[in-house]
């Protein structure tokens, strides 16, 4: 019993040390990772984000995405003043796309589904639902 407690304590201390060191390294480098939604102040959901001006802004709910897209500079500036380091969007997150993967029509840049960190543009609103139901199928097509 004492050995189990000792091993558990050692694992706990090492884990806490790793997290503390990681936080110290980020702070030393002047980085603060985004943990709160800039619109509502809630905890971010890493599956929900707005990609604007080459940066990725995480949000707490789908409604905040449209709010950010209306005035992205406001939220980028606000977070940067707080020392929050936003993720930059690399070209690997962008798909070179001119045709809808569902129906083959010309894409409408206002219509898209964000899946697995990639934005899939479609030709009409009904295609968004189809992409969201089976994203792997449409990512393969692209």
Image (cartoon, rainbow, N blue to C red):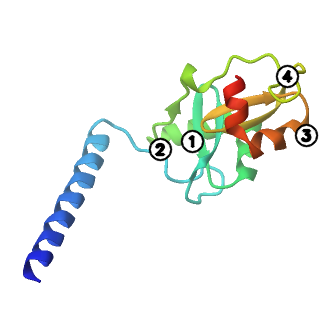
36 over 9 or under it: above or below: above
74 over 97 or under it: above or below: below
Task: State the residue position of label 4.
Answer: 107
Residue 78's disc is: 1
Residue 126's disc is: 3
Residue mark closest to the camera, 4 vs 1: 4
Q: Quadrant of residue 132?
A: top right
The residue drawn where x is 80% and y is 26% is 101
The residue drawn where x is 74% and y is 42% is 134
Regarding residue 87, the answer to whether it shows in the image is: yes
Image coordinates for residue 72, horizontal then vertical, percent: 68, 35
Q: In this view, does 67 lie to the left or right of 49?
A: right
Secondary structure state at the residue bearing disc 4: loop
In the picture, which quadrant includes the C terminus? Answer: top right
Q: Earlier in the sequence, mark 3 or mark 4?
A: 4
Instruction: Tell me if mark 3 has few (under 14), some (14-19) or many (20+) residues whose alpha carbon lies within 10 angstroms of its own.
Output: few
Badges 4 and 1: C-beta atoms under 8 Å apart? no
Image coordinates for residue 105, horizontal then vertical, percent: 90, 21
Image coordinates for residue 79, horizontal then vertical, percent: 53, 42
């Amino acid at each position: 019993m004492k050995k189990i407690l000792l091993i558990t304590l050692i694992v706990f201390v090492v884990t806490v040390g790793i997290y503390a060191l990681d936080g110290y390294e980020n702070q030393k480098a002047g980085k603060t990772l985004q943990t709160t939604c800039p619109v509502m102040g809630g905890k971010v959901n890493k599956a929900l984000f707005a990609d604007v001006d080459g940066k990725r802004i995480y949000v707490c709910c789908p409604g905040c995405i449209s709010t950010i897209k209306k005035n992205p500079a406001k939220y980028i500036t606000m977070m940067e003043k707080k020392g929050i380091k936003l993720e930059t969007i690399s070209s690997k997150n962008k798909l070179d796309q001119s045709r809808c993967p569902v129906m083959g029509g010309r894409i409408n840049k206002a219509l898209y589904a964000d899946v697995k960190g990639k934005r899939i543009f479609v030709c009409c609103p009904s295609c968004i639902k189809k992409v969201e139901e089976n994203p792997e199928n449409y990512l393969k097509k692209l």
